[in-house]
Image (cartoon, grey):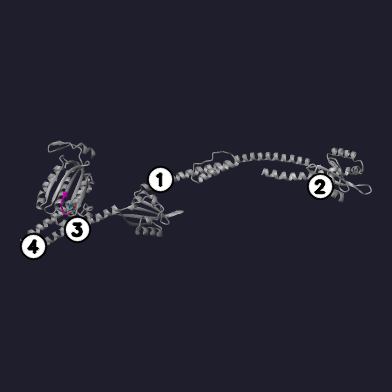
Amino acid sequence: MVLFTVLVTGVLLHSQLQGSLQRQLESSLEGQAGRLATRAAELLDRGDRGPAAAELSELANQLELRITLLDAQGRVQLDSHADAANLGDESRFVEVSKALADGRGKARRKSVLVGRDTLYEAQRLVRADGSVVGVLRLSIGLDSIAQQLAALRARLALGAVAGTLAALLLALYVARRLTIPIKEMTRVAEALGSGDYGRRISQQRDDELGVLGATLNRLGDEITQRIDTISNDDARLRAMLAAMVEGVIAVDQDDRVVFLNDAACQLLNLAAPEAIGRPMWQLLRTAELVRLLEEAHAKGHVVRREIQLQRGSREYTLDAHASPFDGGAATGLVIVLHDVTELRRLERVRRDFVANVSHELKTPLTSIKGYVETLLDGALEDSKNNVRFLEKIAVHVERLAHLVTDLLSLARIESQQGALPREPVDLDALVRKALKRYEEPARGKAVSLSMHGEREPVVVLGDPEALTQVVDNLLDNGIKYTTGGGAVSVRLERHNGVGRLSVTDSGIGIPEEDLERIFERFYRVDKARSREIGGTGLGLSIVKHLVQAMHGNVSVTSRLHEGSRFQVELPLARTPVVLRGVEVVPPAKESASE
Ligand code: ADP
């Protein structure tokens, strides 16, 4: 701006000065011409050119002008700076022709003689009688004007440089005071806006900009504090949601997942990143879910439904609650999923149990009732049948007693809540005794019994009575479900720090789909057949409960029509035991690994 102002002012001043200097020079030339006119006419009229030329030169020197005298035809007669003979006719020049015609003429042009920009003033010289003597022409170089203008230009340039320097200094000062702090504030504000909440303004000032800076810093502090609070709340909420057993899923208005916790990921067998943003019906393709979401949206309050899920070969039951939420801009549904598969299974088992108990009790009771009524109706006197009827009653009573004993044992085990007193038990001796007891029934069915064991005794931690019941049940089943000519064998071994008892038979085997359920109460592969051979359906259930109460586990492998193998694993005992009168310390390796 300063440079521009200086330039414009300079140009205006320059042309103004140039004009006024030229006008001054013109009027001074005009004045001189007026004063010299009479003398010039005399010099022209004089016949003697020599002294006239000398006088003219002197005059010109004094006045610092060039003086030329021309005749009435415009031919040069005398010239203060040149030889008149060399100049000749100059009537072609404007000033001369105008002076001859109008009395006065002026011009500005480059002089032929000196080659400089020159100002010319010509006046017609007239005698007293009115006849024209010639023309007096004064001329002066415009060098002085050029010099003055050059001086002006130099000053203007100096002024421009000084002004620009001053302007630069001022700009620097303004930048330091104003622009730099504003720029810093802009940067800090941008940083805050883009999430870099730690940025602050470093300069402390007491003016308005200082106040603005301090306000911006306070704003930064406030934002940081709020973000911290929000982050903490968010982290706490996420930790709580992550720790929840229930699956929690939040979906937006279009049922797209916006959040889901770890439990939900596990239940739906998903990874969180792949689920976020996807519609819920894509993740869980069940009609119940679609209905649940629709209902929750429509009713505007919590809706509950059970959802069946098939994952691999297993079926899951999820109890799903969907409740709408309205968080201002964010609305949608929160879905809470609770895995009730086990609960529903237990409910079913319990229902079946009650039905089974009733049924199991009813069958022998109906028979007993029938026989008693027959006896009362007169069969008592029938000496042929009365004893047979009573024997039948006895068989059914025996079955009832058996059933009730089994039920009581189950109830007792359950009431002890898995805490059976445990002591070191030599399985070898226990199994041998059991085999002895079953020799008779096995022989009756033509089933061979055998035992294979380790050379070292297998001493486990358990309750001798419970273990006897376990072995009896397994042997009983083995013999019961093996047809004549088959074999039942017991094997004892130590394996990976546990004592293992296996009862293998070459019997009818168990279909694969039933394997998982045979340990349930009353579960029987073939109800009629089991009942016929005196089974209650409780034996394996009792085995399982007893083994678990001794911190062991029981498993089964079986092939239909080929046979089954039941395996019971129990912790090995660490303490020495007295076996057949000899104190035996179980091998250290097994004890340690137990
Ligand atoms: P039960 O008194 O009927 O034998 P359990 O609980 O002992 O009841 O057994 C449950 C069911 O498992 C039996 O009904 C039978 O179908 C099957 N089962 C048990 N042991 C064997 C075995 N060794 N071979 C084949 N099936 C068996």
Q: Which mark is residue 107?
A: 2
- First in sequence, mark 1 or 4: give its number: 1
Q: Which mark is residue 359?
A: 3
Residue at image point 12% right, 44% down? 432
Question: Is 527 placed left or right of 149 in the picture?
Answer: left
- First in sequence, mark 3 or 2: give its number: 2
Q: Which residue is mark 1?
A: 236
Instruction: Report if the beta carbon of the residue with label 3 is closer than 8 angstroms to ligand 1.
Output: no
Seen from this angle, which residue lies furthest bottom? Answer: 377
Q: Which mark is residue 471?
A: none
Q: Nearer the viewer, residue 480 or 502?
A: 502
Mark 3 or 4, closer to the camera:
3
- Do the numbered discs 4 and 2 sit on residues whose CB atoms are within 8 Å? no
The location of residue 200, given as percent across then percent down, is: 52, 41
Mark 3 or 2, closer to the camera:
2
Is residue 55 visible in this depiction of the protein?
A: yes
The CA distance from mark 2 to mark 1 is: 100 Å
The CA distance from mark 4 to mark 2 is: 174 Å
Does residue 110 belong to the magenta stretch?
Answer: no
Q: Which residues are magenta?
A: 504-508
- Do the numbered discs 2 and 1 sit on residues whose CB atoms are within 8 Å? no
Q: Which residue is mark 4?
A: 379
The CA distance from mark 3 to mark 2 is: 146 Å
Is residue 212 visible in this depiction of the protein?
A: no
Instruction: Report if the beta carbon of the residue with label 4 is closer than 8 angstroms to ligand 1.
Output: no
Mark 1 or 4, closer to the camera:
1
Residue at image point 38% right, 47% down? 240
The CA distance from mark 1 to mark 4 is: 81 Å
